[in-house]
Image (cartoon, coloured by chain):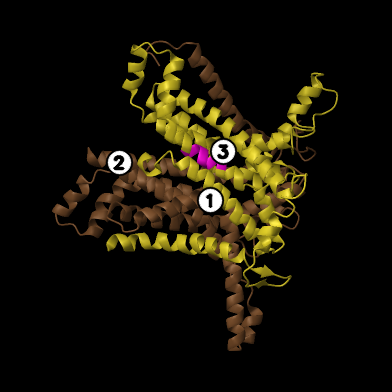
Amino acid sequence: MARNDRGLAFWLLALFFAGFVLFLYGPMLVIVVLSFQGPDGGLTFPLRGMSLHWFYKLAQGLGVVDIGAALKRSMLLGLVVMGFTVVLSVLAGLAFRKKLAGGNALFFIVVASLIMPSIIVSLGIGLEFRLLDTGIKRALESLGMDGVLEGYGTSLGLFTSALGAHLTWTLPFGLLIMFAIFNRFNPAYEEAARDLGATPWQGFRHVVLPLIAPSVVGVGMFGFTLSWDEIARTSQAIGDVNTLPLELQGLTTTVTTPSIYALGTVTTLVSLLVVVVALGLGRWLNQRQKRGRA
Amino acid sequence: MAAWWQALPLTAVFVLFFIVPLALILMVSFWDFNEYELLPDFTAKHYLAVFEGCFNTDAMCVTFKTYLSTIKFSVLVWLITLIVGFTVSYFVAFHVRSPGIQTVLFVLCTIPFWTSNVIRMISWVPLLGRNGLANQTLVGAGLVDAPVEWLLFSDFSVVLAFVHLYTMFMIVPIFNSMMRIDRSLIEAASDSGASAWQTLWNVIVPLSRTGIIIGSIFVITIVMGDFVTIGVMGGQQIASIGKVIQVQTSYLQFPLAAANAVILLGIVLMIIWALTRLVDIRKEL
């Protein structure tokens, strides 16, 4: 702490920190390395040659699981969740800057959703849609629409129950980030715009949005990556088809080849790519903003 | 009025996918069911079933055992993540001088949070498994004769994975609290003759209280409701409340699962209530 003393405490703490980072990244690096295991290699070291063998195997599908289809589903769901998270969080963030009747209650609910055990949320949503199914079937029955009734499966699905389940997880992060942004936001720019005759929409579009854009990218990143890896809340609230992480969780007990590491490498790569793109985009927007101001 | 419209979509999502489902859980926990369907009713029998045999025998009933095991994991993980998270945050906040490097180190600690939890769990297999790196080393060095079995699919691996996955939830709020501490207070403490330890214990720890409490709420609630980590890292052999609910749901025993969920929720709410008595989250952002 003192200016020029990097004493024992500093080095011990630095060592502890380095150990922690190794603990965080070490295992992940191990499976990335092992996913390039040669065709004769197993789940553990030693490496028997280097190859893309297990990635080919992965592309062909693992057992009955169509990895490509699950990947596409998760990707699409992630993008939709991202879109909803960004738009709804920004809107609600704006709302909370004004006088909002019931704002405290809403904030309490959002935080409650964040810390609620996921299995409970998942069970509730699963239950909701099953009861909805029962209701719809009864209605169809009483209306005598047997043809429709026979074709009716379930209202549980990727873009109904699973989407909702993901939003209960991503929106709290989105809203908290928006609070953090607006707590540090200088309202003078907006007031200036209003004084110069800008409509509320123009003020938002040309003044507020460009200023908050770098952080809003972060909201989007949370939206996508949290959805991309979500298991607990989706588990009981998914219909006939699974997302990639759910398939992956099932595969941990059945797949005994390095293909599962290859899958791990692929999903981690997607997550990291999104993080890097988001950080880059945020930086770029920030710099553009600074240049504009200078 | 405009504010209300702007908040409406978000509110609608939480009403539809959070409030209504919770209300349904409460409602259905009093319903009856058979193999085919849920039967509207008002019966407490599922609650009684959860606690069956808990109050009249010497041996502990399954429910209490499960809760005890879950609470044991919560306390252990909470303690370890708190100590590790606090130490890491303390180092970055007070011992790293350049703000740029502080940011880099902080981001370094948070990046894994954005990658898949299951992948991070199974990444321990090649290290801790029967033929894993740890056992190869131990056997190779002649420290043990046969591979150590308790490294994987055990209480140990479950705690390890929890710490691996969720220390981040401690680091972020504690680091945030620490960065808000006025540095002149630290100088004042040291000018008044406080040792580094005294400053740490009497200035930094109390001022990081909010972050510590928020982190604690996250970690404890996650572990209390977990079934994925305990499932994967416990080799599907260790019980937890979350797992009980998950299994009952998969057998479509919704009223039973719902009763268990209500009880779990009650316990978690009590813990959170006790912790939030000490902090106002919204002021901290």
Q: For residue A137, what is the image quadrant?
A: bottom right
Q: Is residue B74 visible?
A: yes
Amino acid type shown at disc 2: Arg
Residue pointed to by mark 2: A184
Measured from the top left, where is residue B182 in percent x and y?
33, 26
Q: Nearer the viewer, residue B87 or A239?
A: B87
From this view, report whether residue B257 is shown above or below residue B277.
below
**Residue A194 magenta-drawn?**
no
Q: Which mark is residue A116?
A: 1
The subunit carrying tag 1 is: A
Amino acid type shown at disc 3: Tyr
User: Element type at marker 1?
Assistant: loop
For this view, does B76 lie left or right of residue B238? left
Q: Nearer the viewer, residue B34 or A286?
A: B34
- On the same chain, marks 3 and 2? The answer is no
Give the residues in magenta: B214-220
User: Element type at marker 3?
Assistant: helix
Residue pointed to by mark 3: B166
- The N terminus of chain B lies in quadrant: bottom left
Q: Nearer the viewer, mark 1 or mark 2?
A: 1
Q: Colour of chain B?
A: yellow
- Who's the residue at 27% across and 50% down the image? A208
For this view, does B30 lie left or right of residue B206? right
Q: CA distance from mark 1 to mark 3?
A: 16 Å
User: Element type at marker 2?
Assistant: loop
